[in-house]
Image: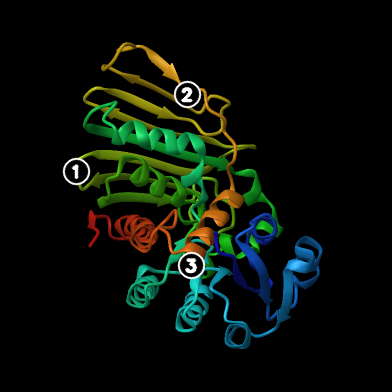
Amino acid sequence: MPKKIKVGFLTNGSGAHVGAYLNALRDTDACNAVVLADPDGKWANEAAKVLGNKLKGTYRDHKQMLEREKPVMSIVTMEAGLAPPVIDLALEHGCHVFAEKPACLRTEDFAPLIKKADGKNLHVMLALANRLNPELIAARKLISEGSIGKVYGLEMNLVADQTRLTRESYRKQWYAQKNRAGGGHLIWLGIHWLDLVQHVTGSSITEAVGFTANVGGQPIDVEDSAAAILKFDNGTLGTVTSGYYLKRGYHSRIKVWGSEGWLHLEQMKDKPLRWVSQKGEQAGQIREWEGSKQPRGYTPFVRACIEACANDKAPPINNADSLRAVKVVYAIYEAAAKNKPIRLE
């Protein structure tokens, strides 16, 4: 029988995506109890409303909750600058961690957490939930099976609205301030696509040349525009554009070219995956993936993380990939600051 576990919820008044995570905990059978720790007391009422009898306690102190309740896994959703010591605290108490990204202001604050987790056989899973979107699973399978042959090159973009940056209320949020978030669009949104392109191709980014800018001119100290050229461990070259450019909505795509065809992901569209393979009966024909786009979002990802921790299975993102996602973003920032290529260790 699948096991069920107690999950801690470590947050504060500025925790991001709290509502989505509470819904995921409510809807995950492998979680049979939730204990909240929120020093600011902001989320207790909402947690009680969403979780009902599944909420078994609320605390104002993270350490006290971990010591008394001993959850098997904890969700840590806090602003980037505050997250590392809380993640460290959870690991010290033998607790797997699901962490809101980016979970640090620099790689040097995150790498020791991964080393500690590895030493304790614990998971640190960044909240890069697009990995389990059905079309991404299908695309990864196509590439791994060799449908488009050897990967030659790729490009990706993730563009959101500039409009949010015009609102003072948004600019006051931690993810719009460099000393609290570590950066702007690239660390908050672009990190998803940088992780996905490595996940879907099975190749790691090893070098980056990057540029960042505030092209919209809003009174913020983080970038609203980032672009980079990337080198992968299999020799592939790629590019990324990450920015706040639109009036509303999102534009996104990942395109991969290979020796035997190409693959095009546009996750915001009804038909999110197209490809051409020079192999098989339909060689040379443009094909559309006909699967359902559901389930997607935070709930299936959180559920998979909890089930992995409960039943000692591989999680949807491992420690090395969580660290790699962080390293890539901060390498691009370093490349932009120093105006030179940066190699990732």
Disc 3 is placed on an element classified as loop
Relative placement, left or right, of 207 versus 300 is left
Q: Position of residue 32 (x, y in %)?
A: 66, 66
Please give the label number shown on residue 344: none
Element marked by disc 1: loop
> Which percent across, then down, holds residue 192?
46, 49
Determine crowd level at label 3: few under 14, some 14-19, many 20+ residues with C-alpha closer than 10 A.
many
- Please report contact status of discs 2 and 1: CB closer than 8 Å, yes or no: no
Which residue is found at the position 39% from the left and 15% from the top?
A: 286
Q: What residue is shown at x 43% (from left), y 33% (from top)?
A: 138
Mark pair 3, 1: CA separation: 28 Å
Report the coloring of the rendering.
Answer: rainbow
Quadrant of res 122: bottom left
Q: Viewed as shown, does residue 162 lie left or right of 81?
A: right
Residue occupied by mark 1: 234
Q: Closer to us: mark 2 or mark 1?
A: 2
Amino acid on which the number 1 mark rests in the picture? Asn
Label 3 or label 2, whichever comes before in sequence order: 3
Q: Is residue 258 in view?
A: yes
**Relative height, residue 80 to residue 251 (above, below):** below
Q: Crowding near pointer 2: few (<14 within 10 Å), some, many (20+)?
A: some
Pick the quarter of the image with the N terminus. Answer: bottom right
The residue pinned by badge 3 equals: 103
Which of the numbered marks, if any, corresponds to residue 289?
A: 2
Disc with the residue nearer the chain's start (2 vs 1): 1
Asked if residue 102 shows in the view, the reply is no
Residue 249 position (above or below residue 71): above
The alpha-carbon separation of the residues under discs 3 and 2 comes to 34 Å
Give the total of numbered labels: 3
Q: Earlier in the sequence, mark 3 or mark 1?
A: 3
